Image: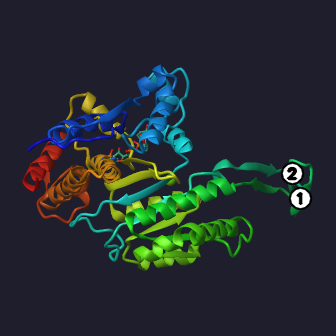
Amino acid sequence: MEKIKMSTPLVEMDGDEMTRILWQMIKEELLLPYIDLNTEYYDLGLENRNATDDQVTVDSAHATLKYGVAVKCATITPNGARMQEYRLKEMWKSPNGTIRAILDGTVFRAPILVKGIVPYVKNWTKPITIARHAYGDVYKNTEIRVPGPGKAELVFTGADGTEVRETIHDFDGAGILQGIHNTEKSISSFARACFGYAVDTRQDLWFSTKDTISKKYDHTFKDIFQEIYDKEFRHKFEELGIEYFYTLIDDAVARVIRSEGGFIWACKNYDGDVMSDMVATAYGDLSMMTSVLVSPNGVYEYEAAHGTVQRHYYKYLKGEETSTNGIATIFAWTGALRKRGELDGNSGLQAFADKLERACIQTVEDGKMTKSLSLISSCENPVILNSLDFIRAIRATLEGLL
Ligand code: NAP
Ligand code: MG
């Protein structure tokens, strides 16, 4: 078979620890033998981020804006322990945070479904994609521990000096206070990314807030979504036969549980944080969650939802066998390759991505899997494979499909 050609480079962001090892295996076993891989490579491994004063992360994000599609390996977000382990010059910020800020993107997370791994919610036969607004609210709050009696006020001073003032509470004793904000710009970007991704993946979009209680704050989210939908997306939605549906967060929770899945659920920052963990757990396993960052102007960065799997990496370094599941990282590659293929009109690349995904699913459904999957699979006698042998088993399945 002749190798598939790529006309435009894919932005490749390498990462850390066990996922960096998987990254190499995936390229060698599943990509390079079949594709003339055209990537612009950025090493986001912590050592190189430290060596470049994190410039490499910024550069990789700008390259993504230039080319439109990136694939990213999981990366370490430094903490105190990592400062020592890697002798860091600084506690570099989360690469995902840096990239998200430059791309102004929204993260969409969806599970990969396979037969034999049944979600805790039995009627979820299709994936539920969670879109989390990743700016503001309680994540950028200002808090006061109120020491005793007094008056709390909310004050806004306009650039021209005009003042808006509201009483929050007249305290007759100790208490607590919190100030939060969001911006129309960020909410609009979030809305456009959500509507765009719904069109892109031809799925209904649900959005929920608590606008009945929060008549200005949450209601503004609802209004901005509705306005952008009516002006920019209603037409496309109707054409594709998909739906935009707004409901109260409590009603949404009830409907989601009773649903069969197959839609995107857009959530405010906190709701998305909580609901994405609930949905991921209910579908079975973190190693089967994909993640894509989508900017409001249609730039895509694909990755696995899990981290660098540090515990497995330390075993690997000691020469012990690991059984780390590479599927979500493979799906990051297939997502990016398919999107690159779509944008370039490269049907060979799109078909390859489809087949590689099918090979992953079929391999697990044939009973070959990694340890953590075998623990939640209903498969009778699963063959438990190590990290590399699992990828090789996927390759064997792929060979049959090509
Ligand atoms: P993690 O890497 O997601 O791993 C947590 C645990 O989940 C693992 O120890 C493992 O459980 C299981 N697991 C996750 N992915 C797996 C896979 N592919 N195959 C098999 N098991 C898997 O989270 P973490 O250990 O909390 O974080 C490690 C590093 O990743 C941190 O430095 C963090 O900053 C970074 N991180 C990066 C990203 C990102 O780049 N997007 C996201 C999250 C975390 P067992 O050990 O029980 O087998
Ligand atoms: Mg969380």
Q: Quadrant of residue 258?
A: bottom left
Q: Earlier in the sequence, mark 1 or mark 2?
A: 2
Q: Check the image and report above or below for 260 versus 319.
A: below
Q: Nearer the viewer, mark 1 or mark 2?
A: 2
Visible in this render: residue 249? yes
The kind of residue on which mark 2 rests is Gly
Number of other residues with Cα within 10 Å of mark 1, as a class: few under 14, some 14 to 19, many 20 or more: few
Query: Which quadrant of the frame does ligand 1 lie within?
Result: top left
Number of residues whose C-alpha sits closer than 10 Å to that of mark 2, classed few (under 14), some (14–19) or many (20 or more):
few
Where does residue 283 sit, x and y in percent of width and height? 35, 64
Residue 151 in view in this figure: no
Question: Horizontal placement of 228 versus 95: left or right?
Answer: right
Helix, strand or loop at label 2? It is loop
What residue is drawn where x is 66% and y is 70%? 223
Task: Find disc 1 in the rendering and name its residue.
Answer: 164
The disc label shown at residue 158, or none: 2
Give the residue displayed 33% in from the left and 38% down from the top. 9
